[in-house]
Amino acid sequence: MSFSFNSVTPRGLALNTTAFSLPFSVSCIAFLDTGFFAGRTLMSLGDNTAGNQYHVLRMGSSGNIQAVSRVGGTSTASHATTVGGNEIHQYGGRWAAANREPCLDGVMNSQNTSSRTPTLNRLGLGVTANNGDANPQDGDLQEFGIWNIELSNDDFAQLGDMVSPLLVRPQNLVFYLPGFNTDYTDKMGGLTLAAAPNAPVAANHMRVFYPTGMKVA
């Protein structure tokens, strides 16, 4: 199964945590609804006391994936390739203090090099992690991964082939949530996320290549 998020009855997952810091990389697989283009969030790290400090992987108004950092201003790197709704894609990005780059289906694009280092004490999936958990996504998301390094272009190319994050730099994978049923506990560090404000519901799991012998339900 995957997690089905919604902006009308806002559904998201979030947790206050200081487990993550720069540099980092993220990835997920998503089947987003038609009409999702409006700054809707896939994954984010931010400040639980403010609405204007975060790193976020989100959809742009033109249907392109964006890697965004905000504190004392906003810096955005927008992928050149656009997508439509009701399509399955791999989305990701990598962040450092003075770098952010988005990824679509394993292809990196459009680096932004402004320095932005917001406070990071909240994780959000399907919502922007801040004091209001804003910009809920519409669609089905799964295979959430966070690494404590900037993944290489080759690493992201592997993820674009719809392989599990468990197969890409596992020694640096610090968060993994496959999206099975209603299990909101991270398989690497044991973090358990909570509804923000409402929990996602179960949806069909999209095709993924897992390590041999892995139990997938």
Image (tube, helix red, strand yellow):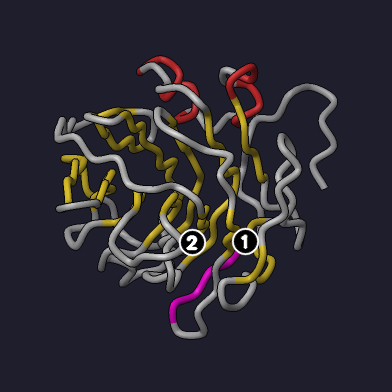
Residue 40 circle label: none
- Nearer to me, 113 or 115: 115
At which x and y percent is residue 189? 71, 37
Determine whether, in the image, residue 86 is placed left or right of residue 109: right
**Within the magenta stretch, is there residue 152?**
no
Q: Position of residue 15 (x, y in %)?
A: 60, 58
Specify few, some or many for label 1: CA neighbours under 10 Å numbering under 14, 14-19, or 20 or more: many
**Mark closest to the chain's N terminus, 2 or 1:** 1
Query: Could you give the CA–CA distance between mark 2 and mark 1, rounded to whole angstroms?
Result: 9 Å
Q: Nearer the viewer, residue 122 or 173?
A: 122
Residue at the (56%, 72%) spot, across then down: 196
Q: Secondary structure at mark 2?
A: loop
Secondary structure at numbered mark 1:
strand
Residue depicted at 40% across the width and 15% down the height: 154
Nearest to viewer (mark 2 / mark 1): 2
Asked whether, in this view, residue 200 is left or right of residue 192, the answer is left
Which residue is more in the foreground, 213 or 61?
Answer: 61
Proximity of marks 2 and 1: CB atoms separated by less than 8 Å? yes
Magenta span of residues = 3-7
* 48 w.r.t. 23: above or below: below
Determine the residue positioned at 36% across, 65% down.
50
Residue 126: assigned label: 2
Q: Main secondary structure of the magenta part?
A: strand
Residue at 22% over, 49% down: 82
| Label 2 CA crowd tier, 10 Å (few <14, some 14–19, many 20+) | many
Q: Looking at numbered disc 2 in the image, what kind of residue is underneath it?
A: Gly
* Residue 3 image label: 1
Residue 6 falls within the magenta-colored stretch: yes
Quarter of image, res 141: bottom right
